[in-house]
């Protein structure tokens, strides 16, 4: 750079600096530009051959000063060069900077970093300490404050916020202490040999906002504790600075902070499983509440303590309270805290529960003290409030959002950040997002488990890691060496919790692992201790395990107790090692068989919803019992259990899973005509019908009818005839269907089976509607509705209301149809039957369009589409496209209506789901205006639609609707 002065006139003419190393060039340029901004620099020169002497003299004269060049500091090409050779050499790039007289330090300061300042301050204190040791009679007592920022030159000195902050910190610091701000520490980063300790937030003189103070001191000179800071308005603390960012938990931080601010709350215990993040949450809350406690927030680590009475000693050590001769330490602590407004964060209390009364006494004696405790076990104090930390939020694997939206789940964000720390190029992509989501779900959103798993991405990509999670306890090891030993592996964390249990609790804990989806107290008693052999009451044992964060509780009316999957894997290991696993699994299987068979009546009864909720809560246990029965060759249990649950799978909209269990059980049952086999065949047939597998359903019902005839089982014969009639109706064989269902109805009337009679009447009404005999259909549905209302079976009421609505719409009674569909929809929403909710919504969309409610029609249609996609209901999606074609026709979008109709017809043909004549007549009526509008072009457009897949047709419909 030439030696031109830095004036406004020369500003546009300044050439560029050229240096050899690109990184050095960047740093040098930044420093030079910053130096120029101060106004303290006369010029900067990039030295070249033979230019050192003349340019230096020229620039020096402009600064009004002489120039003395220390050739020892000039870079040399080789050793032994003479001064003359150095002056002329192009050996290396070197910059010459000339400052205004008296402003040299200001210019040079630009080239120093925050790290230099921090290091210099620490070294200065070391020299002061050395001087004091050399001459104790003349101690050198210095406090140093460090901040970073701009300083503006003014007459007689400099002015700037950073200078003021540093001065206030200097006044705050005691002899031998160096205090800095968060900005200094972040800018300087970690320096070898130095430690940073957060001392709290203080309100410095002249500052409105609190300033977070960091003490900088040698790592090898860390004291056991730090006395509180004393300042104008202080928020002292000894909260440790966290080396990794705190992720998520916004709701928990807000809730815990709000609880601690309540007048009546003096003690709050954060409980949760090992690795749930209790300590990090407590530290974060403590930092957030620094301004609420005049005398500070203090962290007391209890994990390493063992002896009873240690809590008071730890408090005294942390707060630097000295023992007074002749006075119990407890009294000294009480005296010190008597009038202080302080928050104590007591970390890892679970192994010192005998000391809990001491905390209660302290709070009773010191009215301004509050305590935030982290513990895997509840303290059981009258003054205690408990906050159970939930796992981090995880996505729903059945409805994953896009990659960008996944970060809203705290578990995913934590995993990704820790994975990136382990492998710098790790990113969340479309290819690995499902595997990452599965990892988060299978690890229960447990922070410790997620961090340990993320560390493994160096060796295992997410898809490989997800496959290995069947052995979580073996995989999740190798936590940071700076962590406590109990947090370095998942097993160590669980060993710590297990060791806190008495022997009878350990036995119950292991036995409870047999439950795949948790249990009620009653079920636990029947399976885990039917003979009362345990040395504790099961209810008391479960309560204790909840208190110790090894069980979690859900539900209010009938509490359900369950384990996180990581904890259950550990408990199963203990169960298998104890030699009682098979006995417990047999009891478990027999208990859930009894429950399933007890539930069967509910398919047709008024308490159906109660049983649906109960079986839904026990679904994982039912699966586990079925798998055990098949694995253990308990074929009779497997067949009875799967056939007893088939009604639940029908209503629960799980036909694929249910049919798979039934067919596996049937394959092991032989060909004999047994009641269990007949029941299983009948259930599998209905599930096949829900899958639109008409040939499969017919074969199953025919075999069921054959075996029922052998056993002279009149009820099953009647039901099989009705089921075969339903298949015939769906296949379009209406005369056959009517005959079969009529025979079924006659048999059920003779048997006085009201529910079966209602079912047959409903099926006959559907056959009549299929034949467009709407008056007869309406009469049958009305008769069925009266009977089912007497039974109090709401689902049956909803089905018949839906069918009556279809008849009303077919007869152009759109207002009546809307009312009936709305009534049906309300019941289906209440009982949560999604497929029928979707059906009601799509019908209501067409009715709304006919009535001129365009926006309502669109909203109903979109909601029904969402449900069909969630259920992966192919027939439902085909019906949705068909209904969208109706809406398009009614809105005057004739070409779109034709194409959508073609796509729906192609899908129906593929599924074998034909429209009945009654349905065809209503469809034709709805589409006629569009067909007339297009004329000959209708068929061309329809044929175009037949080439669309289901998804293509749906996307086309959505685009067309918003165009």
Image (cartoon, rainbow, N blue to C red):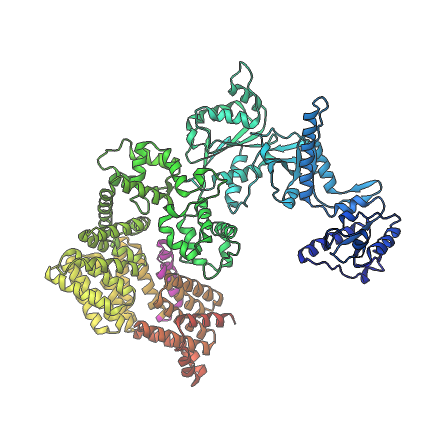
User: Is residue 405 shown above or below 167?
Assistant: below
User: Is residue 800 shown above or below 587?
Assistant: below
Residue 913 coordinates in the image, percent (x, y): 31, 71
Magenta stretch encompasses residue 478: no
- Residue sitting nearer the eye, 100 or 346: 100
- Residue furthest to the front in view is 80
Q: For the stretch drawn in magenta, what is the main secondary structure?
A: helix
> Does residue 931 appear to the left or right of 178 in the view shown?
left
Residue 285 coordinates in the image, percent (x, y): 54, 39
Residue 599 coordinates in the image, percent (x, y): 25, 50
Magenta stretch encompasses residue 818: yes
Res. 949 image quadrant: bottom left
Res. 332 image quadrant: top right
- Residue sitting nearer the eye, 223 or 205: 223
Residues rendered magenta in the picture: 810-836
- Residue sitting nearer the eye, 720 or 197: 197
User: Is residue 550 shown above or below 435?
Assistant: above
User: Is residue 646 shown above or below 250?
Assistant: below
> Does residue 19 appear to the left or right of 4 in the view shown?
left
- Residue sitting nearer the eye, 858 or 353: 353
> Does residue 701 appear to the left or right of 880 in the view shown?
left
On the rendered image, what quadrant is the N terminus found in? bottom right
Is residue 769 in view? yes
């Amino acid at each position: 750079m030439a030696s031109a002065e830095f004036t406004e006139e020369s500003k546009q003419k300044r050439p560029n600096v050229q240096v050899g190393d690109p990184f050095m060039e960047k740093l040098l340029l930044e420093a030079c530009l910053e130096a120029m901004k101060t106004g303290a620099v006369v010029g900067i020169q990039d030295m070249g051959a033979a230019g050192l002497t003349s340019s230096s003299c020229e620039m020096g004269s402009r600064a009004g000063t002489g120039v003395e060049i220390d050739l020892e500091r000039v870079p040399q090409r080789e050793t032994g060069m003479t001064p003359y050779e150095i002056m002329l050499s192009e050996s290396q790039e070197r910059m010459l900077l000339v400052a205004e007289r008296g402003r040299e330090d200001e210019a040079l300061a630009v080239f120093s970093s925050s790290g230099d300042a921090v290091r210099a301050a620490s070294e200065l204190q070391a020299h002061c300490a050395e001087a004091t040791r050399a001459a104790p009679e003349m101690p050198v007592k210095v406090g140093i404050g460090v901040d970073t920022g701009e300083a503006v030159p003014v007459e007689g000195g400099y002015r700037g916020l950073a200078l003021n902050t540093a001065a206030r910190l200097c006044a705050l610091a005691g002899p031998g202490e160096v205090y800095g701000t968060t900005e200094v520490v972040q800018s300087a980063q970690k320096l070898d040999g130095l430690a940073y300790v957060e001392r709290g937030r203080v309100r410095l003189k002249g500052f409105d906002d609190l300033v977070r103070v960091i003490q900088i001191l040698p790592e090898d000179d860390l004291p056991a504790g730090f006395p509180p800071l004393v300042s104008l308005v202080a928020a002292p603390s000894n909260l440790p600075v966290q080396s990794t960012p705190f992720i998520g938990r916004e709701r928990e931080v807000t809730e815990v902070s709000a609880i601690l601010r309540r007048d009546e709350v003096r003690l709050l215990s954060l409980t949760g499983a090992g690795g749930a993040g209790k300590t990090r949450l407590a530290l974060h809350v403590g930092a957030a509440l620094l301004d609420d406690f005049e005398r500070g927030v203090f962290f007391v680590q209890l994990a390493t303590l063992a002896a009873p009475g240690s809590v008071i000693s730890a408090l005294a050590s942390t707060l630097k309270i000295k023992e007074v001769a002749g006075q119990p330490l407890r009294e000294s602590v009480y005296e010190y805290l008597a009038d202080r407004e302080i928050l104590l964060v007591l970390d890892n209390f679970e192994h010192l529960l005998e000391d809990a009364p001491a905390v209660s006494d302290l709070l009773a004696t010191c009215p301004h003290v509050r305590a935030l405790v982290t513990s895997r076990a509840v303290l059981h104090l009258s003054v205690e409030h408990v906050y159970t930390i939930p796992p981090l939020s995880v996505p729903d694997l059945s409805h994953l959002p896009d990659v960008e939206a996944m970060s809203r789940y705290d578990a995913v964000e934590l995993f990704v950040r820790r994975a990136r720390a382990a492998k710098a190029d790790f990113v969340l992509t479309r290819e690995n997002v499902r595997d990452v989501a599965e990892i988060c779900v299978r690890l229960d959103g447990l922070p410790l488990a997620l961090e340990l798993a993320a560390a493994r991405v160096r060796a295992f990509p997410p898809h490989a890691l997800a496959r290995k999670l069947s052995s979580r306890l073996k995989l999740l090891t190798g936590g940071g060496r700076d962590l406590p030993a109990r947090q370095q592996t998942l097993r160590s964390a669980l060993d710590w919790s297990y060791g806190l249990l008495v022997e009878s609790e350990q036995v119950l804990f292991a036995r409870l692992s047999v439950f795949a989806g948790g249990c009620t107290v009653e079920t636990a008693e029947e399976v885990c201790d039917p003979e009362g052999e345990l040395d504790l009451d099961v209810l008391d044992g479960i309560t204790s395990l909840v208190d110790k964060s090894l069980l979690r509780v859900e539900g209010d009316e009938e509490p359900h107790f369950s384990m996180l999957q990581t904890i259950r894997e550990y408990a199963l290991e203990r169960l298998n090692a104890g030699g009682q696993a098979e006995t417990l699994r047999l009891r478990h299987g027999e208990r859930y068989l009894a429950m399933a068979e007890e539930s069967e009546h509910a398919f047709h009864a008024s308490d159906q919803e109660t049983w649906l909720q109960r079986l839904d809560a026990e679904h994982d246990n039912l699966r586990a019992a079925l798998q055990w029965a098949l694995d253990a060759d308990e074929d009779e249990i497997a067949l009875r259990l799967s056939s007893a649950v088939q009604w639940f799978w029908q209503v629960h909209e799980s036909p694929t899973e249910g049919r798979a269990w039934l067919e596996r059980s049937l394959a092991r049952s032989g060909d004999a005509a047994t009641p269990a086999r007949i029941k299983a065949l009948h259930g599998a047939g209905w599930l096949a019908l829900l899958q639109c597998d008409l040939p499969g359903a017919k074969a199953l019902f025919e075999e069921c009818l054959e075996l029922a005839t052998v056993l002279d089982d009149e009820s099953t014969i009647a039901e099989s005839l009705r089921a075969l009639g339903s298949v015939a109706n769906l296949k379009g064989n209406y005369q056959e269907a009517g005959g079969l269902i009529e025979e079924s109805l006659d048999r059920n009337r003779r048997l006085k089976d009201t529910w079966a009679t209602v079912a047959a009447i409903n099926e006959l009404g559907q056959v009549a509607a299929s034949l467009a005999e709407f008056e007869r259909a309406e009469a049958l549905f009305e008769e069925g509705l009266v009977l089912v209302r007497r039974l109090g079976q709401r689902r049956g009421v909803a089905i018949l209301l839906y069918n009556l609505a279809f008849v009303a719409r077919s007869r152009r009674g759109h207002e009546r149809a809307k009312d009936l569909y709305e009534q049906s929809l309300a019941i289906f929403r209440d009982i949560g039957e999604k497929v029928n909710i979707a059906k009601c919504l799509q019908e209501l969309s067409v009715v709304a369009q006919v009535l001129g409610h365009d926006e309502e029609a669109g909203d109903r249609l979109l909601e029904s589409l969402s449900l069909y996609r969630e259920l992966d209901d192919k027939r439902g999606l085909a019906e949705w496209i068909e209904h969208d074609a109706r809406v398009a026709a009614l809105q005057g979008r004739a070409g779109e209506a034709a194409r959508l109709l073609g796509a729906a017809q192609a899908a129906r043909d593929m599924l074998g789901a034909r429209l009945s004549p009654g349905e065809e007549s209503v469809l034709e009526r709805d589409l006629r205006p569009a067909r007339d509008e297009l004329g000959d072009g209708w068929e061309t457009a329809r044929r175009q639609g037949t080439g669309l897949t289901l998804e293509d047709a749906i996307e086309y419909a959505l685009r067309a609707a918003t165009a």
